[in-house]
Image (spheres, rainbow, N blue to C red):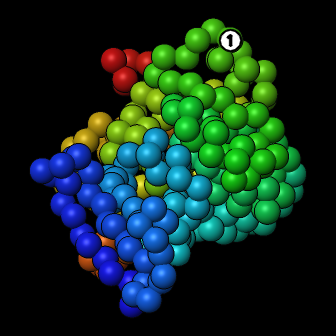
Amino acid sequence: MSIIEKINSQSITQVDFEIRLPEVGHDLDQDEEWCEIVTRKRIRFHDYRAIYGIPGLYEELFYDRLKCVSPRMIRTQLAQVLTERGTEPAKLRVLDVGAGNGIVGEELRALGAGAVLGVDIIEEAATAAQRDRPGVYDRYLVADLTDLAPDERATLVEADLNTLTTVAALGFDDVPPHAFATAYNIISTPGLAAFTIKEDFVTSRDASGFSELIRRMFAEGVICPLARQRYRHRLSVQGEPLYYVAFVAEKIGDIPQDWLD
């Protein structure tokens, strides 16, 4: 058996770590002795910079352990709507907002989308997408949708986008209402918007900015629902189901600027 000494670094280095010594029976001279050190770091689930920096962590955590199904759900919902409307997937030119390391983009490619552009606010996301899923996106833009530079806006407008996707990024300010509105207004009219959001954020009990925006969009006919599905997004760390709602809707018009002001 290995000997493991667990050392709490609060009194030493501010980092938790384990020291693993050689198994008993190794014949080592004093100057040949060694140890293995395993560091520990607490990472918040929304600290995407840290998560994307560790290859494979995002998939292991959210998909293997916590059973996230949201990217597949959006693909399924989009496929259903396209079939009902007699639209070929190849006609989709998608802006994937909060693209992360490309899991949603991969599903869109599997669906048969003709073009997929990714946008995320952090550089680590773009780096991870290139590392983990090279070639999934025709272009990946690192940009703040609430403050687009003229060349960034031109890049998106010139791509002639007709579909917006954003998966599990709404309601917690990962993609704030203003950012969502900017992306939504960039896609053509008519167009499609496919997104998932925690069910709490689309009830009348929630008064957050995004909840008010999406309810107003539906109420005033800016967007027309085509498909809606409540589903289990993933498990919590306690093993409890977290329920989200997946929407596919047709864009009827832009979101007025005074709604955001």
**Residue closer to the observer: 138 or 231:** 138
Q: Residues within 10 Å of mark 1 (few under 14, many from 20)?
A: few
Left or right? Give the position of 96 relative to 167: right
**Residue closer to the observer: 216 or 11:** 11
At x 60%, y 28%, the residue is 142
Residue 4 screen position, x and y as percent: 31, 77
Q: How many marks?
A: 1
At x 46%, y 41%, the residue is 49
**In the picture shown, does residue 243 fall above or below 215?**
below
Q: Secondary structure at mark 1?
A: helix
Camera sees residue 202? no
**In the picture shown, does residue 38 fall above or below 152?**
below
**In the picture shown, does residue 150 fall above or below 145?**
above
Snapshot quadrant of residue 16: bottom left
Camera sees residue 159? yes
Residue 38 screen position, x and y as percent: 40, 63
Quadrant where the image shows the N terminus: bottom left
**Mark 1 = which residue?**
151
At x 59%, y 55%, the residue is 55
Left or right? Give the position of 67 relative to 153: left
Quadrant where the image shows the C terminus: top left
Snapshot quadrant of residue 214: top left
Residue 86 screen position, x and y as percent: 83, 61
Query: Mark 1 is on which residue type?
Result: Asp
